[in-house]
Image (cartoon, helix red, strand yellow):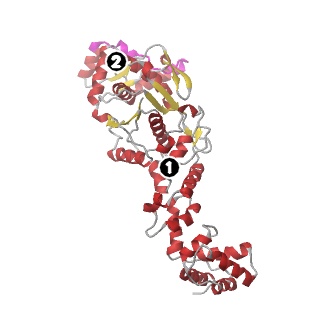
Amino acid sequence: MRLRFAPSPTGLLHVGNARVALVNWLLARRHGGTVLLRLDDTDTARSRAEYAAALEEDLRWLGLDWDESFRQSDRMARYQAAAERLKAAGRLYPCLESEEELRAKREQRLRQGRPPVYDRAALRMTPEQLARARANGKEPYWRFLLSSRTVSWRDGVLGERQVKLPSLSDPVLIRADGTPLYTFTSVVDDLECGVTHIVRGEDHVTNTGVQLDLWEALGGDPAALSFAHLPLLTDAEGGPLSKRLGSLSLRQLRRDGVEPAALAGYLAALGTARDPVPGMPRDLVAGFDLSAISRSPARFDVGQLLALNRRWLQSAPFEAVRERLPAGADARFWEAVRGNLDLLGEARGWWQVVAGTIVPPVQEGEEAFLRAALDALPPEPWDEATWSAWTAALKSATGRGGRALFRPLRLALTGEEQGPDLRALLPLIGRERVAARLRLSAGGG
């Protein structure tokens, strides 16, 4: 089994493409197969080296690796050789119509009630006409002559699928400037690299019919190739998940603090009946089943992703996050705050509460209670029993209980209405900081 992930380095990796990459990787690793990373960079106007580097970095951050890799821009001679074989077989023919001429033809066919497919007028062009056009400085682009048949296959996700080739225009494979297009280069590479399984988005279904016809024209055996098309992702409301949303690039999710284990676990379960569990790809291999993916679109809900992120943080050991915590933060701090984090970056705020300087709000009407709390503050050393002992003494002295007792203390000590258990947090803050904050919140200096 040989699978490939083939992104174009024309932008940052989006969650939709990351899902395709992950499913390819899981399927290959589940069955002892090979993973190829192919950078489809023949679009020289839009492909950029920094995007190629970012793609590889983001894939590695997600926990994916590959066994082989190459760039299409290094294989131009292979595409030229394949094009010459198609020309010799009469399957690749030159065209000279401009985009304006093609648009006019499409509009005319629509007015006549006919499908707006290319009429193959270029096939009637004589060698002399082509020679004259070239002598006048006009270079042809090249179309692939589709077979007049219906292409069928058993899709690994969508089930039985077919594409009626006569209903399609012959696709352009080579531009007038000689650069090959994706439909062509992808088939040449898959054939020559021995790819056996192609997993990609549902938007490629029609393209698959064309490429299978091209695969055969280049000498490939369709029986040696399996396809699976993943239904496209939607947003939480069921609308299209736009690739233009930078907030859903892996780079931005990573900057926002989403953990790779949360994203991988979420993407692996999308479109299945399974509840997502956080885990790096290597942890998800054993439970992966391509047939479990539904034919219906899957909703990408950022709220569910953040819930899974929170779940991972709540159980993450200190060693897993040590390098990304503020300098000085130790295992006691991590265990105290991890249950209250949606994103790891929020730990910085709690470190400021524990080890830094905060200015709590002045609590009007609570001055006497806060000064009583200061008077009842026990001496150090403190441990996790200190909070209970202190608040029990304060309750006895003031007669307060419940929210009236705990809310003013939490606000004074942390500046927040909610947060980590103060039994664990209080010893980390220390008596000096606690006393100073009680005075400030009581309106004193």
In the rendered structure, the answer to whether residue 9 lies left or right of residue 426 reads: left
Magenta region: 109-128
Q: Position of residue 154 (x, y in %)?
A: 53, 22
Is 122 contained in the magenta span?
Answer: yes
Asked whether residue 365 appears in the rendered view, the answer is: no
Asked whether residue 391 appears in the rendered view, the answer is: yes
Q: Quadrant of the C terminus?
A: bottom right
Q: Nearer the viewer, mark 2 or mark 1?
A: 1
Task: Sort mark 1 into few (<14), some (14-19) or many (20+) by Cα contacts within 10 Å.
Answer: many
Is 1 contained in the magenta span?
Answer: no
Residue under label 1? 261
Give the numbered dot on residue 93: 2
Q: Nearer the viewer, residue 121 or 221?
A: 221
In the rendered structure, the answer to whether residue 342 lies left or right of residue 174 reads: right
Residue flagged by tag 1: what amino acid is it?
Ala
Element at label 1:
helix
Q: Position of residue 335 (x, y in %)?
A: 54, 64
Q: Nearer the viewer, residue 437 or 420?
A: 420
Element at label 2:
strand
In this rendering, is residue 410 above or below 34? below
